[in-house]
Image (cartoon, rainbow, N blue to C red):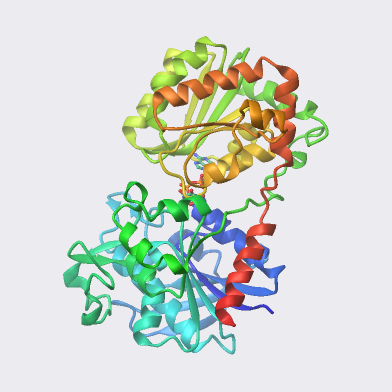
Amino acid sequence: MGGRVLSVASECVPLVKTGGLADVVGALPEALAAKGWEMRVLLPAYRSLRAEAEGWPVVWEEGDLWGGQGRVLAGEVGGKSVLLLDAPHLYDREGGPYAGPQGEFPDNAIRFAALSWIAARIAREGLAGWKPDMLHAHDWQAGLAPAYLAYYGAGGVKSVMTIHNIAFQGWAPGHMLGILRLPAHAFHPEALEYYGGISSLKAGLMTADWITTVSPSYAAELMRPEFGMGLEGVMAARGRVVSGILNGVDTTIWNPAREEPGFGPKTMAGKAAARARLCQEFGLEVPGPLAIVISRLTDQKGIDLLPAVIPDFILGGGGLIVLGSGEPGMEAAMRNLAARFPGRVAVRIGYDEALSHRLFSGADAVLVPSRFEPCGLTQMYGLRYGTLPVVSLVGGLADTVIGASPATLAAGAATGVTFHPVDAMAFGQALERLQALYRQPKLWAKLRANAMAHPVGWEASAAAYAGLYERLAG
Ligand SMILES: Nc1ncnc2c1ncn2[C@@H]1O[C@H](COP(=O)(O)OP(=O)(O)O[C@H]2O[C@H](CO)[C@@H](O)[C@H](O)[C@H]2O)[C@@H](O)[C@H]1O
């Protein structure tokens, strides 16, 4: 059948990215085009994007967008149809999407209400003859879009709200209700009221026609207090319209054959060369498995467990390269590890896409000890590159990695090492198992082959999204 979708988000590759949200929002248009769904992505025209939009036609003008004017510019980026909401008073600022040199922008609630407002208007009224069938809102920044449709009229458009991370809920104080153009009757626990204030994410969850999250396990976890982060009741109440659709990864960008000659499911010579070069680049000499961590350095990602488990891993012959940035205490802890184990541990604080490709190419294992993980992308890059994932059994990690055990090894199904609960003891034991597997080259080669054969592309997920859109639109 097919149709038109307006996708609304605060990030999208290749334009702006701080995390996995951008990867997924950026990958969906192409994945869904193959299923007959034409998708346009609406994003704020942050300062970093204004040059990109130079010369793009203005397709929408809004006279009163919270203290200034807004315009929507339409263009194409990397084959994607992009709509940029240009409102300099809200988005033309130094810094990233959410924060500047002084920290979080104090008016984020308004900045993303404006994005959601325009999304709802375009969805309802259509854009120069382009009328969407579906509005797809991602995370709290787009959460008010389904709410505005619900409160101001949807014009026949259905809405889907996708949760990439329920930890970010878009809370604003209750007195902002009118400012955010929300009706008084919505200030209610059965609607968007949340701990005396307004949650944009809750607003989206309560008003969208359907809710998805990025893995089946996370969908189930979200209804429990350990993972729902206060919204478990909302998720349970709306349980009949919740589904989990696993993310895919872009297998063109994440392609071993593109990284190295002689690197692919049939030959690993290229991977050995990449490993040697990586060790040289970082001044490492590692007799055992070379592990990597590529991550935001936060509590969610379990980074604080590394100092407890890495010393034994190093004693056992292992090595580690960390690439990431985040909480200052964790950055310092990573630097300490590197200082303690020169020649075995290296740390690069920062964000570096090109380096992340070299790391996945050359490493033996990728460590993902997350406390919660809605889907996770790095374990999937690991599978594709034969860089065995060592993951905690939560959320999407549990849905994508098959842990090595006598049974899964015998069945030829194992693709990595898994552990539970998420603590230093279980993580340490998982690393011991990794080292034992590494000492058995035949088994290791089999695990790698299993991992690389595991499908991680968008095909299955795109079909699931298309099926959902079709059900809703029909
Ligand atoms: N320093 C660095 N340098 C280079 N690249 C770096 C980097 N730090 C991180 N990255 C990259 O950023 C992305 C992170 O995506 P994840 O899915 O792993 O987590 P994130 O928590 O951001 O996403 C949230 O949304 C996504 C999308 O739905 C969910 O998969 C996830 O579980 C959820 O927490 C990956 O592409 C990774 O390679």
Image-based side of 59 in relation to 149, left or right:
right
Which is more toward the observer, 206 or 295?
206
Quick check: 59 above or below 322?
A: below
Q: Can residue 215 be seen in this snapshot? A: no
Q: Can residue 474 be seen in this snapshot? A: yes
Residue 223 placement: quadrant: bottom left
Identify the residue at image location x=67%, y=58%. 460
Quarter the N terminus occupies: bottom right
Quarter the C terminus occupies: bottom right
Image-based side of 217 in relation to 195, left or right:
right
Quick check: 364 above or below 247?
A: above
Which is more toward the observer, 104 or 67?
104
Image-based side of 120 in relation to 3, left or right:
left
Which is more toward the observer, 97 or 136?
136
Image-based side of 156 in relation to 444, left or right:
left
Which is more toward the observer, 471 or 4?
471
Residue 421 placement: quadrant: top left
Residue 282 position, x and y percent, is: 58, 22
How many numbered marks appear?
0
Residue 97 position, x and y percent, is: 41, 57
Quick check: 45 above or below 455?
A: below
Residue 445 position, x and y percent, is: 74, 25
Residue 3 placement: quadrant: bottom right
Residue 211 position, x and y percent, is: 46, 66
- Residue at far top of view: 315
Identify the residue at image location x=32%, y=31%. 329
Identify the residue at image location x=56%, y=86%. 131
